Image: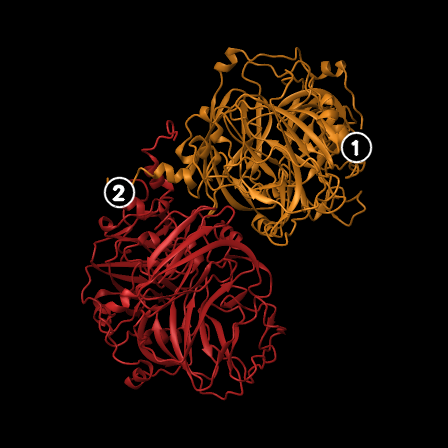
Chain colours: A orange, B red
Amino acid sequence: MGVLVGSWLMKVVFISSYILIQSSKAKAAAKTRHLKWEVEYMHWFPDGREGVVIGINGQFPGPTIRARAGDTIHLNLTNKLHTEGVVIHWHGIRQIGTPWADGTASISQCAINPGETFVYRFKVDRAGTYFYHGHYGMQRSSGLYGSLIVDVAEGEKERLKYDGEFNILVSDWWHKGSREQEVDLSSKPMRWIGEPQTLLINGRGQFNCSLAAHFSNSSAAPCKLRGNEQYAPYILKVHPNKTYRLRIASSTALAALNLAIGHHKMVVVEADGNYVAPFSVENMDIYSGESYSVLFTTDQDPSSNYWISVSVRGREPHTPQALTLLNYHPTSPSRLPTSPPPVPPRWDDYGYSKAFSKNILTAPGSPPPPSKHDRRIVLLNTQNYIDGYTKWSINNVSLVLPTTPYLGSIKYGLANAFDAKSPPDRFPHDYDVMRPAANQNSTYGNGVYMLEFNSTVDVILQNANALKENVSEIHPWHLHGHDFWVIGYGEGKFSSEKDESRLNLKNPPYRNTAVIFPYGWTALRFVADNPGVWAFHCHIEPHLHLGMGVVFAEGAHLIDTIPNEALGCGLTGKMLMKNNNNNNGHN
Amino acid sequence: MGVLVGSWLMKVVFISSYILIQSSKAKAAAKTRHLKWEVEYMHWFPDGREGVVIGINGQFPGPTIRARAGDTIHLNLTNKLHTEGVVIHWHGIRQIGTPWADGTASISQCAINPGETFVYRFKVDRAGTYFYHGHYGMQRSSGLYGSLIVDVAEGEKERLKYDGEFNILVSDWWHKGSREQEVDLSSKPMRWIGEPQTLLINGRGQFNCSLAAHFSNSSAAPCKLRGNEQYAPYILKVHPNKTYRLRIASSTALAALNLAIGHHKMVVVEADGNYVAPFSVENMDIYSGESYSVLFTTDQDPSSNYWISVSVRGREPHTPQALTLLNYHPTSPSRLPTSPPPVPPRWDDYGYSKAFSKNILTAPGSPPPPSKHDRRIVLLNTQNYIDGYTKWSINNVSLVLPTTPYLGSIKYGLANAFDAKSPPDRFPHDYDVMRPAANQNSTYGNGVYMLEFNSTVDVILQNANALKENVSEIHPWHLHGHDFWVIGYGEGKFSSEKDESRLNLKNPPYRNTAVIFPYGWTALRFVADNPGVWAFHCHIEPHLHLGMGVVFAEGAHLIDTIPNEALGCGLTGKMLMKNNNNNNGHN
């Protein structure tokens, strides 16, 4: 992996000074963007085999939202599923002042009932590459996702220099429907969903054929595509000697991925909506919940096309590499590259992955994190059993979301809506993270970490051995409502004595998603300055389904009006209806 | 078909006088039966192949409710589905005074949200054979059903003479899940769900094998069963020379069925919870939504066992006959009958079916229907297109259920909850029911037939040609909240002049479900004496899904308190929450 960090690269990548203050003129130009979406199941061919996806307005993936920083999104979401509720989470949007619009069922709102329309109204306050996805049951696995791209405000100049851009949303796809997957995961003994059948690039993958069959030593047949198939690859058409911005986000249910553009270096410039110190790579890792921008220059022979590949990382891959083409003008897009697709790093080369993650540092000029933390929460990630059911737990609590959304029950101080006792801030001192637990049993819970408003919180995500000996997995953790600074990675068990001084408080990256590596820890710092209730969880959907998450709450007294529509279920629904006795109520 | 109607049979079947008044002593003994149910998806082998069913308390079919007339059922239903709402309809229970407990989503209540508990509290006022099932989307097809048997009140004597009884709930099963089926049906062009893979007797069927393989000319392998499989047949164990009551209800999604007990005659004695004039048959038809009791006597050679068969009627069968055994004591249940399974009547022998249906007449002594009707509603059943989607329509309106339950919106007079205009009471005079319509297009609607309280209503269900030439199907229509008298069947188009005088007002059967035969009509009469809002629809679930139903409302001003929990969605939810501005609401 070629890594180049230097001021010359900064100059190539960025236009001028690193700190740009949005002008008030730009803010005045902010728009409200009105969108009207209908969510419904539909037939689709994500990978050449027909399945059922959740589509939006007849599209899969859902429509790309494109807005400018400072705009307000005003989105009427109508649920056209027959019997299921639905919500949509706007991944990376911090929902400052609108915590009820975060789109997390049981946390920020009640699921929208079939036939009903809910209005998501929120500000996209910052340029960057984001996406959205279902956050109820395993609806993300059913294909409920799409891109959300925020450009700099009207009148502002984008700091990055490029001539054109592309946007890629990667995902993984199973032939078994998500209802069956949920039942499998919830069974005793648990039935694991297994590896995805296909990786999708902008919702398009090839299951029964390969674009690179002429190179492959596999038995896959060459794809016969006219180009108008729902699973025909999304081809990136470029002109020679230009610089392009490639935006990449991952909404995979499970897969950690590695992306490469054959024969082209990429310069990483953005992560999760924040500029990073640019560095050059041959290929890049991307975990579920992350987004990036890279710049690449079309400096190769224009009479050829080049592979763009997406491959599985971190789990023994049983899923073919996803492929599409970088198509140089005026070469025909039907001309396949003359060299084989990029070879990804070995799936279990964790050193390679760690090096990539550690290379991500904030762009110079970004404000550093607070130098001290007010509270440190250490979260032990373990795989457990509860009554013979396989679960994931954090500090021995496996999260089972309550029926009443926390946002309402906390704002109104409703007792019995969730566990009154907060989960623990740490795990037993003598827990051996390198071995299967002596006692593999865990408990269900739905208590909340109550954070002091405006306090600085450190979270140490502590990985451990899973149920089986010599197994420890990668987990990408995603925080709602905030970005955090990733102030450190380490091996084994975190120790304040030993590791404190090695934390990076100078130029840590500012992100909303960070991974823990096998048998390691990752240290995060954030300021609890966004009144609301916020999920913090492993972004692997089946892991969250099995309890791998926690809930943070802060500034409850500052939470503004929550639309009744967000609270019409559970105890908040009962509360809001209680003064209306429908006994006498003719009108 | 042997049909015997005679007073001698009455004497054999019934114990004493036909009119029994419930004693006040018996009423005093009525109980409240507390039940606690959890509904969830689970793996199951309904027919030897594993699938996913909706189970109740881990059982499929759901637990049998057994109560006595006059008892109150108090049932806590907790929805453990991950993302879907749920309701349960108590089929045949009229819900007098408790219309909110009828368990029809969008009509009597909002679907129960995941994680929530709803209390169904209602009186089972009358002995009989009933069942229950999901009434939301196509959850009935997913297996959400079970039996509901009401015995005569404590201290009352059952009129029928028998030594023992059995209960059979028949259903049909597809290997494709109901989510996919819903998507198929809602597609353009529509994809029909096709015939079921398997018929189930008490949730048990055999797909890959046959109990009668040694007779069959099919290639089905003999079943190798230990008896403890989830799909092992439910065997009826009898002693020789006894009389048994066999209760039968059909919750099929599609299939019309014919049931026979090899070498045994059956005497039909009950239909839909009402005693009928007994008549003897070799086999009997049963349509979805119907229930019956038959008596049979074990007068055959006890050294043999006998087939009980369930076969498809009315549609060209592609589904194997379901089989189980009548097992005579002390013969081993593993001894298969020596003669082949009963041969059902030809699937398209409609004359046979009509003869059976017309033989059903009320038990002597039952009160006759009112001699006159106050209103007559003629409902034309047609298959149509709307914007290229295939639908079923009634008087050219295809029912699309509203988001707000009618019961609430009608009680509270909420405008905009549904079409203000009632659908038409009749169809164009010159419509030719024998041919495909000149204009096959229809419209969506959700208006309500507002019935005058206590008025007598006639409904003429008028069948017609479907979209394709020379096709007209059987539809079993089920009325909620009432029984009706089936006062006539006829061929072609109903004509008041010609057919009025031929209606049976003397001894028509009193039922909640009645079929229309191809190209024919069926006349029903009922008294609109049950304050509430009531579905009346084809009981074929995909037909209802495609719009084949209407809604009746009566006595809105007499509707008693509706639990808020039933109304926390749509406009009633908004209304009940409107006085509670959650802006200021700390407590």
Q: Are marks 1 and 2 in contact (CB under 8 Å)?
A: no
At label 2, counting other C-alpha atoms closer than 10 Å, the crowd grade (few under 14, some 14-19, many 20 or more) is some
Q: Position of residue A525 (x, y in %)?
A: 63, 24
**Circle 2 residue:** B413
| Quadrant where the image shows the N terminus of chain B | bottom left
Which of the 4 quarters of the picture holds residue B515? bottom left
| Quadrant where the image shows the C terminus of chain B | top left
Q: Position of residue A381 (x, y in %)?
A: 66, 38
- Give whichever of B252, B517 is nearer the camera: B252
Q: Residue at x 45, y 48 (%)?
A: B85
Residue type, label 1: Gly
* Badge number at residue A216: none
- Give whichever of A154, A587 is nearer the camera: A587
**Circle 1 residue:** A351
Q: Residue at x 75, y 37 (%)?
A: A336
Relative to residue B224, is residue A528 depicted above or below? above
Relative to residue B239, is residue A306 depicted above or below? above
Disc tally is 2
Q: Position of residue A149 (x, y in %)?
A: 58, 27
**Disc 1 from disc 2: Cα separation:** 68 Å
Q: Chain of mark 1?
A: A
Q: Residue at x 44, y 44 (%)?
A: A114
Which of the 4 quarters of the picture holds residue A544? top right
In the drawing, does residue A66 fall left or right of residue B3?
right
Residue type, label 2: Gly
Q: Chain of mark 2?
A: B
